[in-house]
Amino acid sequence: RRRASGKTSYSTTSTDVDANGVVMQAPTDSLSVWATVRYWRAPLVVISTLIFFTFFTGGINVRIYAPSIFAMAGMSTGRRATMTVVLGVVKVTSTGLAVW
């Protein structure tokens, strides 16, 4: 940014706009640790909650053990591989739709 005098001014905060159009400012100086913690509290709670439910709902177990589960269901080797790929595509598509 330039002032009328031609000197460059620097901001001590970085700004971001949330989904509601509210300008949020994250302090960048090292003396305002608590202000930084307050700024990042909501995103960290959301991320931690998502990670918690990801691990404890067992979704990763289904993906890892899918071939074994399909084998116990009596599917052939080729069919197990195909169904594992289909399962992966469904999970990626579902995640993409949920994020969008």
Image (cartoon, helix red, strand yellow):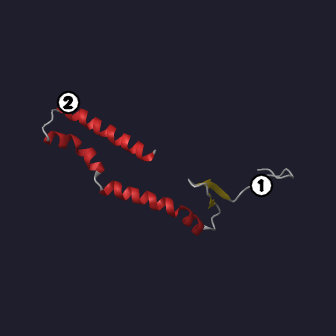
Q: Nearer the viewer, mark 2 or mark 1?
A: 2
What mark, if any, has residue 78 been given in the picture?
2
Q: Position of residue 35 (x, y in %)?
A: 59, 67
Viewer-closest of 95 and 3: 95
What mark, if any, has residue 53 been given in the picture?
none
The residue most toward the right is: 5
Q: Which residue is mark 1?
A: 9
Q: Is residue 3 left or right of residue 40?
A: right
Amino acid on which disc 2 is placed:
Gly
Q: Is residue 84 above or below residue 39?
A: above
Dot 1: element: loop
Q: Position of residue 3 (x, y in %)?
A: 82, 53
Dot 2: element: helix
Q: CA distance from mark 2 to mark 1?
A: 65 Å
Residue at the image point whose x is 56% and y is 53% from the top: 19
* Disc on the earlier residue, 2 or 1: 1
Q: Position of residue 42 (x, y in %)?
A: 50, 62
The residue most toward the top is: 78
The quadrant holding residue 93 is top left
Viewer-closest of 32 and 91: 91
Q: Is residue 72 left or right of residue 53?
A: left
Viewer-closest of 93 and 60: 93
Amino acid on which disc 1 is placed:
Ser
The quadrant holding residue 13 is bottom right
Q: How many marks?
A: 2
Residue at the image point whose x is 35% and y is 57% from the top: 53
Residue at the image point whose x is 45% and y is 62% from the top: 45
Q: Is residue 81 above or below residue 25?
A: above
Q: Position of residue 29 (x, y in %)?
A: 65, 63
For label 2, the crowd category at 10 Å Cα-Cα, with few meaning under 14, some 14 to 19 and many 20 or more, is few
Residue at the image point whose x is 30% and y is 57% from the top: 56
